[in-house]
Image (cartoon, grey):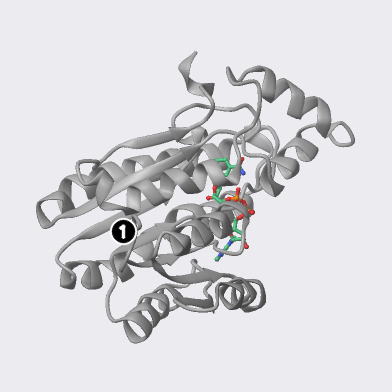
Amino acid sequence: MSTLEGKIIVITGGGGSIGEATARLAHAQGASVVITDREAGPVEDIAASLRDRAVGLAVDVTRREDNERMVATALEQFGRLDAVFLNAGIEGEVGPFDSRSDAAWEKVFAVNVHGVRFGVEAALPALREAGGGSIVMTSSVAGVRGAAGLSPYVSSKHALVGMMRCLAAELGPEGIRVNTLNPGPVDNRMMRSIEDQSNPGHGEEVHDAFAARIPLGRYVTNDECAAMAVFLFSDASSGCNGNTYMVDGGYCAQ
Ligand SMILES: NC(=O)c1ccc[n+]([C@@H]2O[C@H](COP(=O)([O-])OP(=O)(O)OC[C@H]3O[C@@H](n4cnc5c(N)ncnc54)[C@H](O)[C@@H]3O)[C@@H](O)[C@H]2O)c1
């Protein structure tokens, strides 16, 4: 039997790099998936390529009603909800702390923190109805370490770790497990953006400097992040609650 046979999972940021890899792996492991992102087109295409047990849906995580519609869709299409992957996030602008505008801070927090809060609030009634479940939030190494030039992003990812710990304590007695996935630098669009913003025209140098600080000597991959997310959705992680699950090649070990 596959790891996620019969499980119903909703995914935010499912049109992005880690989200799509996770949707595909969860589906391959037997799950039914509601794949959501800001725009319908890319997630509908991913769902269509999976053929069965998959729905694509436009969801802006900053809108409470969109999160509620996401959960309602899982219930309508598949009858229950077992796990949520609150993964949508933005890197925001890179720059010194005192050069960030109020709007820049608010935009990052609206998606990375309040978007996750709305997702939890929307999912809770359905997870309670199912008798338990798994909530996985995508934080980051930026949720446990600082980084010069990334204040709003780092602050938002630390906030998720705090939210996760409170929820794990509150919901554990109901059989709802809450954990964070904490990737290190991933070989994908978001890191290209951070590299290019950090040193315009010389992003490759920033890439090499980051990679040199990782004991494995390289960025991790979307698939390596997806593997951890799928483990946290599954019953194989039934004892895991209230923790940060690093997929960082050893970045935080030193
Ligand atoms: N790429 C990395 O190196 C890295 C490292 C650590 C953590 N993360 C985190 O992983 C998660 C996934 O990022 P990724 O690397 O796949 O990058 P990505 O940019 O490919 O994916 C992020 C997705 O979130 C979506 N999104 C943004 N705002 C949204 C909104 N308001 N409503 C709905 N969807 C929205 C985007 O459209 C995009 O598809 C993010 O939370 C990110 O912060 C990424």
Residue depicted at 34% across the width and 80% down the height? 78
Give the crowd class for mark 1: few <14, some 14-19, many >=20 residues within 10 Å. Answer: few
x, y (%) of residue 151? 57, 36
Residue depicted at 50% across the width and 53% down the height? 112
Of all residues, the one furthest to the front in this rendering is 1
* Residue 197 versus residue 53 in the image, above or below: above
Residue nearest the viewer, comparing 147 with 205 = 205
Residue depicted at 61% across the width and 64% down the height? 15
* Residue 165 versus residue 171 in the image, above or below: above
Residue beneath label 1, please?
1
Screen quadrant of the N terminus: bottom left
x, y (%) of residue 44? 60, 78
x, y (%) of residue 132? 18, 61
x, y (%) of residue 158? 43, 38
Q: Mark 1 is on which residue type?
A: Met
82 lies left or right of 103: left
Image quadrant assignment for residue 89: bottom right
35 lies left or right of 82: right
* Residue 147 versus residue 236 in the image, above or below: above
* Residue 115 versus residue 42 in the image, above or below: above
- CB of residue at label 1: within 8 Å of ligand 1? no
Image quadrant assignment for residue 149: top right
Residue nearest the viewer, comparing 107 with 205 = 205
Q: Is mark 1 on a helix, strand or loop?
A: loop
